[in-house]
Image: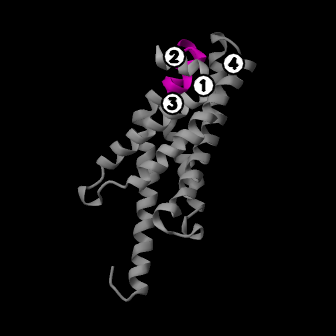
Amino acid sequence: KFYREWNAKRPLMVKAATTSTIFMASDTCAQLLNPPDLGHDVGRTAAFSFCGAVLTAPYFHNWFLIAERFLPGRSMWPVKLAVDALTVGPVYLLLLLTLQRSLRPLRTGESFSELQWDKVFVEAKQLWIDGLFICPVYQGINFVLIPPAYRVQWMGACQFFWNIYVAHVCGKATSNASHAAESQTAVKAGVAP
């Protein structure tokens, strides 16, 4: 009851908090899949959680409002699903990976020029292709069965496992770049990596 009331009064705030929590849990699980010697990167988890709150929740909250305004009702679900899969999803993935890369220097000390921006499009395209096997299933259910006020939360709950994969991909790029930066620093200092 409390959650429903707050979702009605402060929908974006509730969706941001819910999505942030799901992203935090997803990244934590993704890091548990890493070798134990890597440890847990709290900064990475915080960055992924931040992305859930400031990007994912508002982005999809507004997409679902727009979808209901211009394509009202359940009968339009195939059109909503097509727009979601072919435009909204790819743009979102590009924004997510860009935000992740932009936050990395705060954790790693890398400069923005070292962030391999050219790989963002390649990674976003691959995540989008991979997502086409998963996301349309839960988004179809979302557009047919879930009330509009709870679509972001439904999507977030479904994305928990998908986000483990996304966090792994985002974290893998971070780990590779961090390792390369550490190796360069060690070589400059005269210490073999």
4 or 2: mark nearer the eye: 2
- Residue hosting label 3: 135
Label 2 vs 1, first from the N-terminus: 2
Q: Is residue 25 above or below residue 94?
A: above
Residue type, numbered disc 4:
Glu
- Residue hosting label 2: 4
Residue 160 in the image, given as x and y percentages of width and height: 42, 34
1 or 3: mark nearer the eye: 1
3 or 4: mark nearer the eye: 4
Residue at the spot 62% in from the left edge and 29% down from the top edge:
61
Residue type, numbered disc 2:
Arg
Tag 1 secondary structure: loop
Label 3 vs 4, first from the N-terminus: 4
Q: Is residue 175 magenta?
A: no
Residue 55 in which image quadrant? top right
Please tell me the numbered disc located at residue 10: 1
Magenta stretch in the rendered image: 138-155
For marks 3 and 4, give the CA distance: 19 Å
CB contact under 8 Å: marks 2 and 3: no
